[in-house]
Image (tube, helix red, strand yellow):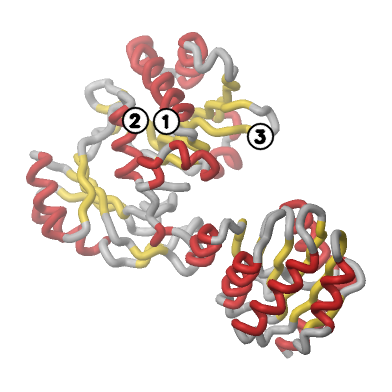
Amino acid sequence: MKIHEYQAAALFKAYGVRVPEGRAVAAPAEAEAAARALGDGPFVIKAQVHSGGRGKAGGVKFAQTPAEAARRAEEILGMTLVTKQTGPQGRVVCKALVSRAVQIAREYYLSLTVDGARERVVMIASSAGGMEIEETAREAPEKICTLEIDPYLGLTGYQAREMGGRLGLSRAEIQQFIPLCKNLYRLFVEKDCSLVEINPLVVDGAGDLVAADAKINFDDNALFRHPDIAELRDENEEEPRETEAAKYDLNYIGLDGDIGCMVNGAGLAMATMDIIQAFGGSPANFLDVGGSATAEKVAGAFSILLADRKVRCIFINIFGGIMRCDIIAEGVVAAARNLAVKAPLVVRLEGTNAEAGKRILSQSGLNIVAAADMADGAEKACRLAKEAGA
């Protein structure tokens, strides 16, 4: 789960990380009032959307006076911000952050994330702050420093001191950098984060380290432990079909193809997408209904697939282990009837009660194409999708 910058900045402040004073606003008048409350300018007004690259897209503006802050907020609020991360559809800006502009002497990058290959939390830092870390990795990889953190020891003072030295910080700056890093790590662990990022971390005119930007992502699977964090979710920033899928406890990710996929098991779902592409097709989604799908789940999955106007054919690929294929077949038939599914359905059932499931499908009277195996199902789905688009 992602949150907005102003929400992340509040968490940083609660954990002892210095951030610019600021307020979230939803109207130009609120921006002017916020700037007046902050005192003398200059001010920075930032679009609050779940995306990086806001400055390049026109989502970050500066103002010298409260009246100018209101004008800049009016330019940002309501705009559709298009960045590399939003895709061409962009994101509508509903809120902006008005904060005191930081006098920047130097910029750095600092983050904590989980490295699955190393099975560790890692700290990543760079002297090339203000740039996208992917761009730095491509153009100047020597400027990126990484540090593994032992889960038993946590982030130690000497590790933070070493990282500060690698960044070229002065002795006085390192004395600030050590507690900053330890506080960020404490936040990362206590709130079950998957990413904590500051870009840029700046040395201001007074020589203080300030998080001029704040980004935090959380592990969805741990949100039950953090109801306060779950309340920060902004569903307007999420893909509507993914939000709907979460209501049915479905794992769904929208893609750009035209063959809707309904599969049980993440591994089988990925294999299904691969074999569709091998037969020249293009999957419209990743959709894992899990190992305990019910008729309600199947109906929910269908509704999500059908909400994608690009879908021309649906490939249902089920391997019944704990899940019974006859239960899935009953759910498919009921959902297809109730939702008046018009897209061709290709169904492959294998495993527990597969023969009973196949009989239910064949006796349904619906336009359901049976598949002998996964390859047969993928070939038929690709052919039917192509014919539907002709």
Verify CB contact (< 8 Å) between mark 1 and mark 2: yes
Q: Nearer the viewer, residue 290 or 255?
A: 290
Verify CB contact (< 8 Å) between mark 2 and mark 3: no
- Residue 178 lies, in percent from the top left, at 40, 15
Residue located beneath label 2 in the image:
202
Residue located beneath label 1 in the image:
108
Residue located beneath label 3 in the image:
116
Residue pictured at 80% horizontal, 79% vertical:
361
Q: Is label 3 in a helix, a strand or a loop?
A: loop
Q: Quadrant of residue 144?
A: top right
**Left or right, 296 with reference to 22:** right
Q: Do we see residue 375 in this rendering?
A: no
Q: How many marks?
A: 3
Q: Is label 2 in a helix, a strand or a loop?
A: strand
Q: Nearer the viewer, residue 71 or 142?
A: 71
Query: Callout 1, which amino acid?
Result: Tyr
Verify CB contact (< 8 Å) between mark 1 and mark 3: no
